[in-house]
Each structure stands twice: as C-alpha cells, then as structure tokens.
Amino acid sequence: MSVRLLFISLYMTLTVQTAVCFEPKPLPYAYDALSPVISEETMHYHHDKHYVGYVNKLNELIVGTPFEGESLEDIIMTSDRSIFNNAAQVWNHEFFFEQLSPDPAVRPSGELLEAVTHQFGSVEAVRTAMDEAAVNLFGSGWVWLVVDDEGELSILSTRNAGLPMRHGLTPLLAMDVWEHAYYLDYRNRRGDAMHEMWRVMDWRKADERYLNR
Ligand code: MN
C-alpha cells in the first residue's frame, strides 16, 4: 500500500470512528476557576476521570446495539440499565458543569425570579430546600430544580443517574450529590458542600433554560 493510500485509509477509519462516538466536552472554564468552592484537584477527578469515564464506557457499551449512532438525548429517553446509567451520567455532568461559573449570577432574574418568588417565597428558600433534599438523599444521586409543562417549579431528587426528563420534567439547575463531587474538599460534610456550591452556581443558565423550555 502506498503511503498516500495508507493515510487515506487511516483518515477514513478515524472519521468513521468519530462519527459514532461521543466526545467528552471540555470544561467551559479553567480547572482552578471555581476554587476554593471546588478545588482544582476535584475538578480534574470529576471531569477527567468520572465524566470522561462515563463517555468512554457509553461508547464501549453501544457498539453493536440499536443505540449506536443515536443522539445522547434519544439514548437517555429510551435505554435502561448500564447504557442508561452511563448515558444519563454523561448528560447530567454536561448540564452540571455548564451551569457553574467563576463569575455567577447568584440570583435568577426576570420571569424565573417571579416564578421562584411566587412559589417558594424567596431565592434563599429554593437554595435551602435543595440543600435539604441533597442531605436527605440516601446514597448517590442528583437534586434538581425543575419545571413542569404548566410552568410549576419543584425540587426533584433522583437516585444514581436518574434525570428529570424521564419524569416528564424540564431541569433548570442540577446539584451533583455523588460523593465524587465533593469528598476531596468537604469529606463527609455534604450539607456544607451543597451550601458552598451556590457560590459558583450561575442562575443566568437557569434563566435561559426557563425561557427556552
Ligand atoms: Mn459527578
């Protein structure tokens, strides 16, 4: 085989592989950008090991199944067991990382602020309710601020990789309540970890998600 042909076939192999594989998304900020709320070390483990691990595992699991070539959104809505767990963890982490910021809006605004105030009384009350839900969640999972088809807000806890869309709800904010999200920095103090997390949660994302739902 000529060198040129070898390169063409290598290129084709690579592009074909890329087409059916999910690619991990890079963090939208530096690894140390959220320190001291979330340390650089935690971000490296959380993103590079846990999240990328779910992406790799998902790519491995879907080979030869009807899910190969499907969108992540389709997979999370129709799969179960290992494929669901890994696909949902990919989706959940991308949603979670995207809403954190070194320069967050610490309150919602506009329509979401109105809805929050109307339903919970205050932004503080939503934060407290989510912190409590996180502390009361046994084992690993997620706590979400969600909105239903009627525009009603609520707080939802899901176990393991569970996500709101499988409950017919739209997520606005997510709290990762897996120990890997906080244990290096806060050890067993989950309540403190969640409380501190609000300092890097960007409500601008929640505003956008609320308006675009
Ligand atoms: Mn996580």
Image (tube, grey):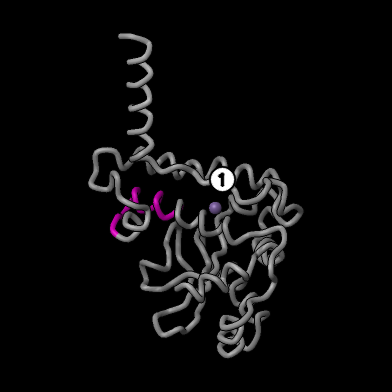
Characterize the local packing of mark 1: few (<14), some (14-19) or many (20 or more) Cα atoms within 10 angstroms.
few
Point 28% across, 58% down: residue: 78
The three-letter code of the residue at mark 1 reads: Pro
Task: Check the picture and name the quadrant holding the C terminus.
Answer: bottom left
Point 53% across, 44% down: residue: 50
Front residue of 64/176: it is 64
Q: Which residues are magenta?
A: 78-89
Point 49% across, 43% down: residue: 24
Residue 163: x percent and y percent? 43, 64
Read off the residue under disc 1.
Answer: 26
Main SS, magenta residues: helix
Q: Would you identify the image quadrant in which residue 99 lies?
A: bottom right
Task: Check the picture and name the quadrant holding the N terminus.
Answer: top left
Q: Is the shortest distance between ligand 1 and the CB of mark 1 under 8 Å?
A: no
87 part of magenta stretch: yes
The residue positioned farthest toward the right in the image shown: 36
Residue 204: x percent and y percent? 62, 69
**Relative horizontal placement of residue 150, taking residue 179 as reference (left or right):** left
Residue 200: x percent and y percent? 69, 62
Residue 150: x percent and y percent? 41, 85
125 part of magenta stretch: no
